[in-house]
Image (cartoon, rainbow, N blue to C red):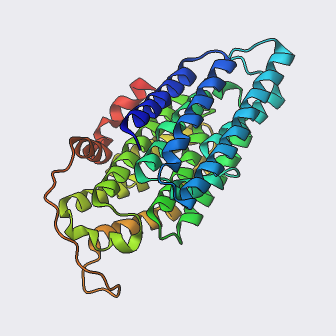
Amino acid sequence: MNPQAKLMFALSLLLGTTITITSNHWIMAWAGLEINTLSILPLIAKSHHPRAIEAAAKYFMTQATASALVLFSSMTNAWHTGQWDITQMTHTTSCLILTSAIAMKLGMVPFHFWFPEVLQGSPIITGLILSTIMKLPPIALLYMTSHSLNPTLLTLMAIMSAALGGWMGLNQTQIRKILAFSSISHLGWMAIIIPFSPKLTMLNFYLYVLMTSAIFLTMNTVKVLKLSTLMTSWTKAPALNTMLLLTLLSLAGLPPLTGFLPKWLIIQELTKQNMAPTAIIISLLSLLGLFFYLRLAYCATITLPPHTTNHMKQWHTYKPTSTLIAISIVMSIMLLPISPMVPTIL
């Protein structure tokens, strides 16, 4: 793709995200979401492969439907209350439609079907954008309307997302699909706490973006897309693969790594809200995700020859690791000591 075109699409993405997260009026937020959708489509379809074209078509249809529902819910709310302000979402039916629309935008259960397929059909850097930046505007809308959303519906969707994200990821061999189901599972953790502590949801989202970025950038560096090639990639960059092991364990939420921090705080907050059974259920469901993270980690570093798959060893690359990967990996592993500061922020 032409560098100028790439720059234009990247700036449009930035513009759309900024418009949505800074707007107070529903029409402006909707316009930002539309700019975002139209900017990412050429980046998904740029390889002209049939799978990429299919992914772009699926993404467009899903996002267009979700945007229409956002507009419909805001218009219904304005019809009944006379308010176009995002924070003044008071009509019950409008709130339910909005929750469904944002769940569709994010790829939460039961609107998750498009996300693994789109991620699988996209290039790895576009996959990173879809998993991180593209989730910021819908999460921001959830944050702004959190006080008026239905906690029962959100809790139900969150538990289903955590269950299905873990369950569906167990049998996958494609790394992008595994990361898609990981994203669905993490969205469950974010959605379950948003009615009670929206700032905690944002903290969870920021840390998720940090850890996922580190994994996608590492995969892009070692040029790995499936488990069978991941098994032999350790010879390419042994140090990077060792760090990948720790980042995957952090994404799984194991102490004493960064990923444990949001899970710990969410379980604590749920217990304070007298939702201990819910906290236990979602904690147990995260063990499903732990299995496929361990599987990825095992393939990345612990599988040594001789093993059953017939592969040629890959050459060691002496290309220096980029500073961005180094910083994101270090932060993905070592942020747990900041946990005493978090209650002061929240």
Name which quarter of the figure residue 41 lies in: top right
From what the image shows, is residue 277 above or below residue 32? below
Name which quarter of the figure residue 20 lies in: top right
From what the image shows, is residue 54 above or below residue 61? below
In the image, 154 versus 128, the foreground residue is: 128
Toward the left, the furthest residue is 318
Toward the right, the furthest residue is 80
From what the image shows, is residue 287 above or below residue 306? above
Residue 209 located left or right of residue 311? right
Q: Is residue 162 visible?
A: no
Q: Is residue 220 visible?
A: yes
Name which quarter of the figure residue 245 lies in: bottom left
Quadrant the N terminus occupies: top left
- Residue pictured at 72% horizontal, 31% vertical: 70
- Residue pictured at 19% horizontal, 50% vertical: 321
- Residue pictured at 63% horizontal, 24% vertical: 31
- Residue pictured at 62% horizontal, 60% vertical: 164
Residue 142 located left or right of residue 305? right
Q: Position of residue 126 (x, y in %)?
A: 45, 47
